[in-house]
Image: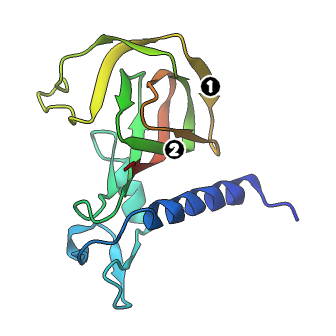
Amino acid sequence: MMIGRGKSTWIVMIALLGFAGTSRAQQGATDASKNSGEAVAGGNPFPVLYYSKDQVDASFEQTGGGDTLYGGDNGARNYKIATSVRKKPGVAEVHRNLTDICYILKGSATILYGGTLDDVIDSHFPDGRPYPKTEIRGHKIVGGETRHLVPGDVIIIPNGVPHQFTEVEAPFWYYVVKVQQP
């Protein structure tokens, strides 16, 4: 039986989330009121969360270019889910302990990955906020491979792999699941 491309992509993402969610012991109870999703009752300390289309659309429309849908309940879970919007190429980055799983929804972009991070940037975003201690940013990547991403594509970037969006057909919208590696 053939499964449509969209359905098979979501099956892969759900399987990866299931693996991510079981790869770390559950800690404490969730304060569902801290999440933007609606908790579905069931008595589980980690309730099912639901985000309506309106909530998701609003998340993509944030002025900063996307927003966190689920933040991992302050470390109780080993993954976070965000909407992301790119309007132009970005800096190169390496996540020391996060694997990015991206599902492309709108627009297109070219991503450069692998190779070596070059010309490391100061440890702060342009607005003055510090970069997370587990990330390194740079102006470019030397070497590596490119891939053109279009709606329906999924790309998994393991922790430790430099990556950079080098060309963007805006608006470029994608979901990203960030999985914390042990």
Is tag 2's residue or tag 1's residue first in the polypeptide sequence? 2
Which residue is disc 1 drawn over?
147
Instruction: State the image quarter where residue 92 is shown.
Output: top left
Tell me if residue 128 comes above or below residue 175 in the rendering: above
Q: Residues within 10 Å of mark 2 (few under 14, many from 20)?
A: many
Instruction: State the image quarter where residue 76 is shown.
Output: bottom left
**What residue is shown at x 21% (from left), y 74% (from top)?**
33
Q: Which of 77 and 54 lies nearest the eye of the viewer?
A: 77
Q: Position of residue 83 (x, y in %)?
A: 40, 49
Amino acid on which the number 1 mark rests in the picture: Arg
Which numbered circle lies on residue 90?
Answer: none
**Which color mode does the image show?**
rainbow
Q: Position of residue 131 (x, y in %)?
A: 20, 32
Q: Which of 59 and 144 lies nearest the eye of the viewer?
A: 144
Residue 171 horizontal side relative to residue 155, left or right? left
**What residue is shown at x 66% (from left), y 54% (from top)?**
9
Q: Position of residue 66 (x, y in %)?
A: 35, 45
Tell me if residue 4 comes above or below residue 152 in the rendering: below
The alpha-carbon separation of the residues under discs 2 and 1 comes to 13 Å
Q: Position of residue 47 (x, y in %)?
A: 36, 80
Q: Residues within 10 Å of mark 1 (few under 14, many from 20)?
A: few
Which numbered circle lies on residue 102?
Answer: 2
Residue 100 horizontal side relative to residue 55, left or right? right
Quadrant (top left, top right, bottom left, bottom right) of the N terminus = bottom right
Q: Furthest residue to the left?
A: 128
**What residue is shown at x 52% (from left), y 66% (from top)?**
18
Question: In this orientation, does residue 53 appear?
Answer: no
Q: Secondary structure at mark 2?
A: strand
Q: Secondary structure at mark 1?
A: strand
Amino acid on which the number 2 mark rests in the picture: Cys
Question: In this orientation, does residue 24 appear?
Answer: yes
**What residue is shown at x 71% (from left), y 57% (from top)?**
8
